[in-house]
């Protein structure tokens, strides 16, 4: 369940600001129809930072209920260990197959604090945990040395590496057990990350082009490196457009333009600038997505 392509699925909203539950179910079905077998609700792309506790758990519940073919890796991170433990236990009770837990943000814990944080979560649940390292959002990096220590904790199954540091990824792969899974956290680095031992990607782009994203990952898994490079290169302009503004603004906008459920954003996220919107439209049109 921890290899291949997982979609960091968006949280569609209604015009009144609530969660579009029917729309979320439709997106889950779309993902499964296109071959996705791992779904990640309530990550960065799912606007988890603006969901209250009840909404957060409701999104996980809906995805678990609607998914018929996919494993659900529920985002349950928080910068307070007690809150992360509560969310993790609740997600397990709802039927999530695994957890994605971001390194504590804002308070910038020491490496020892990071280890204690994940020890507490792992002690509270029986399902596997994927650590989420994204220094650009959290304000601190989980180094390879710290990841080696985390890999020793029973229940810590892998890491979503969004540091952008291939040297760090390679070191983690080399210094952790063979069953410790490294996943790329950046669509633009899927092929490079897999070339140093990552097993796949937790993707933003697969929200709109799941088939293309799967094809890249499967080519790399099969050792068809030239084919993977070609497919990846074809996707790069689209990936660039999906990060022209803060994620998930462009990908939700793209889904809306494609006629799929997305809806508005919650402040402090807001609509794209007119110039960036026109650029996104041109890119989507060039891929025949709109």
Image (cartoon, grey):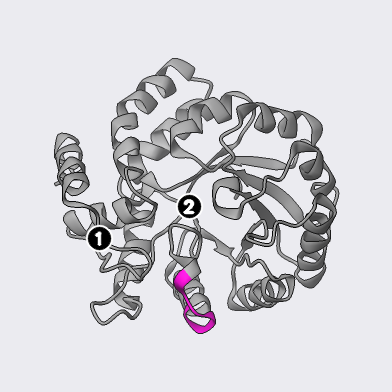
Left or right: residue 261 compared with residue 167: left
Rendered view: 259 above or below 169: below
> Viewer-proximal residue, 26 or 269?
269
Rendered view: 201 above or below 100: above
Magenta stretch: give its range: 50-55
Seen at 82% across and 55% down, the residue is 115
Name the residue tied to disc 2. Answer: 37
Q: Tags 1 and 2 in contact by the CB under 8 Å rule?
A: no
> Viewer-proximal residue, 128 or 279?
279
Q: Label 1 vs label 2: CA separation?
A: 30 Å
Left or right: residue 209 compared with residue 192: left
Rendered view: 198 above or below 274: above
Left or right: residue 230 compared with residue 170: left
Quadrant location of residue 238?
top left
| Image position, residue 70 (x, y; %) | 49, 58
- The residue most toward the top is 226
Label 1: few (<14), some or many (≥20) within 10 Å?
A: some
Dominant SS type (magenta): helix
Seen at 64% across and 29% down, the residue is 197
| Image position, residue 180 (x, y; %) | 74, 42
Residue 271 disc label: 1
Label 1's element?
loop
Seen at 60% across and 36% down, the residue is 199
The answer to if 179 sits in the magenta stretch is no
Label 2's element?
loop
């Amino acid at each position: 369940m921890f290899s291949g392509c997982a979609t960091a699925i968006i949280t569609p909203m209604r015009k009144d600001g609530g969660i579009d539950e029917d729309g979320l179910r439709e997106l889950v079905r779309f993902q499964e129809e296109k071959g996705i077998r791992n779904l990640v609700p309530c990550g960065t792309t799912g606007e988890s930072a603006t969901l209250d506790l009840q909404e957060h758990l409701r999104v996980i519940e809906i995805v678990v209920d609607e998914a018929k073919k996919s494993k659900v890796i529920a985002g349950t991170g928080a910068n307070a260990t007690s809150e992360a433990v509560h969310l993790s236990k609740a997600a397990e009770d709802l039927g999530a197959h695994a957890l994605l837990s971001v390194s504590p943000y804002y308070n910038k814990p020491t490496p020892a604090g990071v280890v204690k944080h994940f020890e507490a979560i792992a002690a509270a649940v029986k399902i596997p945990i994927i650590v989420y390292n994204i220094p650009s959002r959290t304000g601190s990096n989980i180094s390879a040395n710290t990841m080696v220590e985390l890999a020793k904790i029973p229940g810590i199954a892998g890491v979503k590496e969004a540091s952008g540091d291939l040297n760090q990824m390679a070191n983690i792969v080399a210094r952790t057990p063979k069953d410790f899974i490294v996943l790329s956290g950046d669509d633009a680095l899927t092929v490079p990350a897999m070339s140093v031992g990552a097993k796949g990607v937790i993707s933003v782009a697969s929200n709109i082009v799941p088939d293309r994203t799967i094809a890249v990952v499967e080519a790399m898994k099969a050792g068809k490196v030239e084919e993977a490079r070609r497919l990846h290169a074809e996707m790069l302009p689209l990936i660039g457009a999906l990060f022209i503004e803060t994620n998930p603004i462009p990908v939700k906008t793209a889904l809306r333009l494609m006629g799929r459920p997305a809806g508005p954003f919650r402040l402090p996220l807001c609509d794209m600038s007119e110039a960036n919107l026109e650029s996104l439209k041109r890119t989507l049109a060039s891929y025949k997505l709109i």
